[in-house]
Image (cartoon, coloured by chain):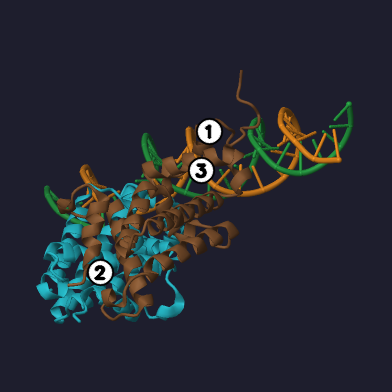
Chain colours: A brown, B cyan, C orange, D green
DNA sequence: CCTGCTAACTTGACAGTGACAAGATTGGAG
DNA sequence: CTCCAATCTTGTCACTGTCAAGTTAGCAGG
């Protein structure tokens, strides 16, 4: 008995396999043929669903932006403040490092893809909302818009450095706790 | 008349070509054979100097860390403060985006390479020195160590997002000025 | 001058990859 | 029951990274 001709859920399977493979060895080492093997299908099957390697990564990135938006909305619904949103950003990056690794590398993606665009917009809105609640006093007089970008930058930078293993051991091994420490100086009111 | 058998400066030429190619289309699209063609040598010539594709990227990364350390030392020598060091970090990232794109992607590199290690150490020291001058009052009571990581995070995140084209147009098109605005909230004493 | 040695480069080959074209199979709408 | 469109396969091509073996050139010592 062999596998059925129609896999049934190949698209999702491939995305999951891609995330796993990227988590293991980065986006550069990703091979469509290897994904096909892992999924037990022929080497050209992925192309049918994603057209292209860039298409696959674009789909992954879109999924990532959706996950991120979900995570941010969730913390916001739980009454979290800006600091919590920042920690949520880091939590997302660590939990879905494969997605995160692809989301901000435009040259790997199909920038014009409508799914990607709308997922990006959702995440963008969620980010904006997360920062909107911040008090002017917490921002040391900077405009709320600029302060939002400051928050985004510090959180994004922390996540990137953490995932790259660039940060010193002083921070411990819990990314969320470490993030809280590093982000706090931006918002702490003295 | 053909090219001489010995190129004379192939290593440097290849590194420059690699930087150019990566700037154009990212590290993933880099091809050793293409570099060889650009340099007018045979397809296997690069391997002799770098052993490996990872070897080439490692050499690029090491060069990048050296450039970064130079840039930071220079601002420090000019009497710049933490904010200036941050801007210098961004200036480096924009001026050498190919190097920057490779420096923090461990899976592309040969992490044990001694040249890379020592260049990383130099940059690390330069970063530490840049933050060392900061006053405790500017840090809102956070330990100097943590505050240094905050500064690194915000600057690294800004550079990454800027290069990825993820930041809104509100910031204008001068990266250094934009960086100054975004970094300031972390250090401004009100 | 020439002998030999080593670093720099070339040539040739191999397996693996992404992409494309053309064919096979299937589930499901009508 | 028929047919059609979506799904997947097979075969092929140019290209890539890497390795092994050969070639050339610079250079030190006689």
Quadrant of res B36: bottom left
Furthest residue in direction top, as rendered: A1
Q: Are marks 1 and 3 on the same chain?
A: yes
Task: Tell me the number on the disc at residue A39.
Answer: 1
Position of B66 compared to B108: left or right?
left
Sequence order check: which comes first, mark 2 or mark 3?
A: 3
Q: x, y (%) of residue A167? A: 22, 55
Q: Position of residue B73 (x, y in %)?
A: 16, 73
Residue linked to disc 3 = A15
Q: What residue sits 19% from the left and 51% below the top?
A: B114
Q: What is the chain letter for disc 3? A: A
Say whether marks 2 and 1 touch (CB < 8 Å). no
For the residues marked 2 and 3, what is the alpha-carbon distance in whole angstroms? 37 Å
Q: Nearer the viewer, mark 2 or mark 1?
A: 2
Nearest the eye: B110 or A89? A89
Do labels 1 and 3 touch, CB within 8 Å?
no
Q: Chain of mark 1?
A: A
The quarter of the rendered structure image containing the C terminus of chain B is: bottom left
Disc 1 is placed on an element classified as helix
Q: Residue at x 28, y 57 (%)?
A: A161
Q: Nearer the viewer, residue B29 or A53?
A: A53
Residue nearer the viewer, B165 or B140: B140
Q: Which residue is mark 2?
A: A187
């Amino acid at each position: 008995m062999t596998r059925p001709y129609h896999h049934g859920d190949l698209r999702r399977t491939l995305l999951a396999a891609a995330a796993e493979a990227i988590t293991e060895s980065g986006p550069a080492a990703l091979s469509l043929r290897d994904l096909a093997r892992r999924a037990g299908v022929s080497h050209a099957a992925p192309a049918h669903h994603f057209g292209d390697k860039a298409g696959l990564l674009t789909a992954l990135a879109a999924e990532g932006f959706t996950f991120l938006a979900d995570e941010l909305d969730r913390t916001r619904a739980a009454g979290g403040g800006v600091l919590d949103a920042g920690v949520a950003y880091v939590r997302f990056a660590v939990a879905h490092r494969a997605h995160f690794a692809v989301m901000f590398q435009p040259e790997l993606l199909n920038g014009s893809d409508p799914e990607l665009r709308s997922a990006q917009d959702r995440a963008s809105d969620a980010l904006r909302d997360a920062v909107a609640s911040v008090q002017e006093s917490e921002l040391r007089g900077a405009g709320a818009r600029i302060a939002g970008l400051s928050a985004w930058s510090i959180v994004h930078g922390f996540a990137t450095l953490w995932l790259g293993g660039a940060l010193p051991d002083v921070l411990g091994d819990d990314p969320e706790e470490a993030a809280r420490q590093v982000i706090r100086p931006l918002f702490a009111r003295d």
